Amino acid sequence: MLSQHEAFARIRLLRSPNIGPVSYRQLLARFGTAAAALEALPDLVSRGRGPYRPAPADSIEREVAAVRKAGARYLFHDQPDYPALLAELDSAPPIITCRGRLALASAPCVALVGARNASAAAVKLARDFGAGLAEAGFTVVSGLARGIDGAAHEGALSLESRPTIGVIASGIDITYPPQHVDLQERIASEALLIAEQPPGTEPRGRHFPSRNRIIAGLALGTLVVEAAPKSGSLITARLAGEAGREVMAIPGSPLDARALGCNQLIREGAVLVQTPEEVVELLQSFTGAPRSRFRVSESAADFDYAELATAEWDGAGTEAIAALLSNAPVAVDELIRQSGASAAAVHMALLELELSGDLERHEGGLVRRSGPQ
Amino acid sequence: MLSQHEAFARIRLLRSPNIGPVSYRQLLARFGTAAAALEALPDLVSRGRGPYRPAPADSIEREVAAVRKAGARYLFHDQPDYPALLAELDSAPPIITCRGRLALASAPCVALVGARNASAAAVKLARDFGAGLAEAGFTVVSGLARGIDGAAHEGALSLESRPTIGVIASGIDITYPPQHVDLQERIASEALLIAEQPPGTEPRGRHFPSRNRIIAGLALGTLVVEAAPKSGSLITARLAGEAGREVMAIPGSPLDARALGCNQLIREGAVLVQTPEEVVELLQSFTGAPRSRFRVSESAADFDYAELATAEWDGAGTEAIAALLSNAPVAVDELIRQSGASAAAVHMALLELELSGDLERHEGGLVRRSGPQ
C-alpha cells in the first residue's frame, strides 16, 4: 500500500508539466518514489529556461477533494487493486479514478464498441451481445458514447448483476454526452465508472484515443459491432490487437457503408463473429495467443527502466540527442543506434528533453521535437 | 494428339459399367491405352458373375454423333487443349465436352457462385463483380443456375470479349434451368460451355457436386456471393480450398439469414472481399499458396498409378481386400496398412472390386463396399 504522502506525490508528479505515462514511470524508476522525484526535479531540468516547476500542491489538494466529493477513488498502476490486464499495457495509465464496484474489473472483461450514429439493427445487436456476454459471466466494457456503446452497457445492465464498466474521456465528475447523464450515473452507482483525466476535465478530442486504450486494455478481447473506416472504434480494435488481445468484428454487406469498418477489420485479421456464443467460445479459450491475426506495429526494443536508477544525467549528452531530433517522429531505437550512446543515456536525455517541453512522444516508441524548429 | 481410334476407346471405357475417374486412370496406367484396357477387361473381371461387358460400341457412336450435332467437342484430361488448372485436380474429369471459345479457359479464371434464391442486392453484386472481374482480364466461371450464377455470367457478358464459362450438370445438349435457355445458348455461342455428362443426360442431384468441382477446378479462386449454410455453393468453395485455390466470400449482417453461409466460410478461413478490386489484388498475387486458410481434409497418400503397369492381378488378394470392406467408408491407406499387401496390389484389388460393382469410391480417398452386406 502506498502511504498517503507518496500517493499525493504521485498524483502531483503526473499532473506536473510535460509529464506523461513514460516520463512518470522513468522518474519513479530513477528516484524510487514520486516524492523523491519531485524534490530532485527543479535542480535537474532547466535547459536555460529557469528551474522546472512541478504542479502546485494546492491544486492537487483541490483535485483530491473533488475526487472524494464525486464518491470516487484513485488507483495506481503498480498496486494490487489496479485492473490486472490494464496494468499489462506498456502505456497503462499510471493513475486512474473510479466509482462503483471495482470487483467487476476482476471478472473476465470484453469490450464492445462501435459507431455513435449506428443503424437501428446494430444498436439492437449491441444490446443483445451486451446482455448475452453479461449472462455468460463477462463484464462488458465500453465508452458510454451514443449508439453502440450505450446499447452495450444497457444490455449488460439488464442483468441483475449489472456487469459493465464505463470508461470516460472526461474527469470522473463530468458527464458526457448529455444524452447519457442518467446512464453514466447508473453505471457509477450500480456498476463501475473509470476515468483517467483529473476531475473537472471536459472531454477533448485528444482524450478519446487515450480513453480507447483503457477500454481495449481492460478486456481479453474487443468486439466492434458497427463502425466506419477510420473511426475511433477501429483505433480501439487496433490497440487491442497491438496489446495481444483478441479482436472481433460483426460483418455487414459491402453495400452498407456503416459495415465497411468492421469488414476492413476482418480483412486485417479480426475474427468474424455473429453471435454472443461465438465470442464466449473465443474468449473462454483465450490463453494469450489471439486467434485474430493483426500485423502488430513494430514496437520499441525492451528497455528495463530500472537501468535509469544509475544512469548518468549528462547535459552534453542531452544536447547531442536534441541535435538528432526533428519534427519528424523517429524511433528511440534509431536514436540509440545513431548516437552511439547507451540506451539508458538516451532515455535519460529524452526524459530531460520531455520535461523541458522540447519533446513529444508518439505511439510505438516514436519521439519528435515539439514546437517550431 | 490422340488417334480417332483411341479417343473413341477412351469415351467407351469411361462410359462402361462401374468405371469412374479413378478406375479410368488406373486402367490407362495399367494397359497404356483405353483400347488395350477394353480388350483386356472381359477376361480380367468376373468374380463369378460372368464376363465384364464394356459399353456397347454403337451407343458410343450415337454419343459422338450427338456431341457433333450439338456443335461440341471432346477434351481429354492429359491432352494439351484440356484446361490446365482443371487437369491439376486429383478428381479431374477424364473427358469433358465443350462448345465455344476454348481460349477463354486459358485466361486466368475466377469462379463466382451463390444462391439460386439470392436477394436483389446480392444479384446486383454478382453482376457488378462479374463485369468488374471480366474487365480486369479474368474469365468468370459459374454454373448457369438462377440467381447469383446467372447474374455473374451476365456481368461478364456485358463486355464485348464475353469472358465467361458456364459449367452445366447435364449433357452439353440439354438446357437447364428453363429460365436460362437463352443464356446457355448465348454462352455456348459467344463464350464457353462445358459439360462432363454425356449428351442427353438430364441433370440429377448427384451431378451437381461433380459439376461444382469443375467450376472450382477451372479457377484460381472461388468467390461465394451469397449462400445459405450447407448449400452447394459452400461445397464448391470447400472443393476450391481442398484443391489449394483461393476461397473468398462477400459478408453480410448476421441478421440476414442469406448471409450466414458466406459469414461461416469467412470464419473457416475464406478471405472477406468487398469489391472486385480486392479479388483482383488477391488473385493477381496468387502463387499457389492461398491467403485463405481452410482446414483441408486429410487426403490419401500419393500413389503413382504407373506402378499398376506391373502389379500382380491376383484373385486371392482381391478377396482378402474384399473381406476388409464394409458399408462404412474406409481410407485406402488404412486398407494398405491392415492388409499388409503392397499399395499397388491393394489398388489393383480395389479396381477389380469397383469394376465388378462391389465398391464405391468417396471423396478423400475413401472406399466402401457397395450394396447390401
Image (cartoon, coloured by chain):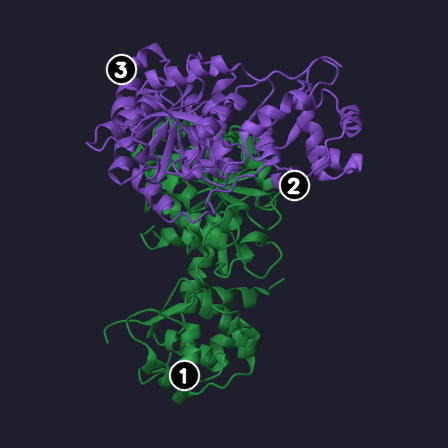
Chain colours: A green, B purple
Q: Position of residue B181 (x, y in %)?
A: 30, 13
Write down the quadrant of residue B132 in the picture: top left
Q: Can residue A146 be seen at all in this image of the molecule?
A: no
Same chain for labels 1 and 2? Say yes or no: no
Local SS, label 2: helix
Which image quarter holds the N terminus of chain B? Answer: top left
Q: Chain of mark 1?
A: A
Mark 3 is on which residue type? Asp
Q: Residue furthest left?
A: B160
Which of labels 1 and 2 is toward the front? Answer: 2
Q: Nearer the viewer, residue B231 or A268?
A: B231
Category of crowding for the residue at label 2, using alpha-carbon neighbours closer than 10 angstroms: few (below 14), some (14–19), many (at least 20): some
Q: Position of residue A295 (x, y in %)?
A: 45, 54
Category of crowding for the residue at label 1, using alpha-carbon neighbours closer than 10 angstroms: few (below 14), some (14–19), many (at least 20): some
Q: Is residue A254 left or right of residue B265?
A: left
Q: Nearer the viewer, residue B187 or A298?
A: B187
Q: Residue at x 30, y 30 (%)?
A: B164
Q: Are marks 3 and 2 in contact (CB under 8 Å)?
A: no
Q: Residue at x 66, y 27 (%)?
A: B351
User: Dot 3 corresponds to which residue?
Assistant: B182
Q: Is residue B308 above or below residue B232?
A: below
Q: Work out how far the residue at label 1 is from the one at label 2, CA to CA, in angstroms.
A: 68 Å
Which image quarter holds the C terminus of chain B? Answer: top right
Q: Chain of mark 3?
A: B
Mark 2 is on which residue type? Glu
Mark 1 is on which residue type? Ser
Which of labels 3 and 2 is toward the front? Answer: 2
Label count reads 3
User: Dot 2 corresponds to which residue?
Assistant: B307
Residue A339, numbered label: 1
Which of labels 3 and 1 is toward the front? Answer: 3
Q: Work out how far the residue at label 3 is from the one at label 2, CA to CA, in angstroms.
A: 48 Å
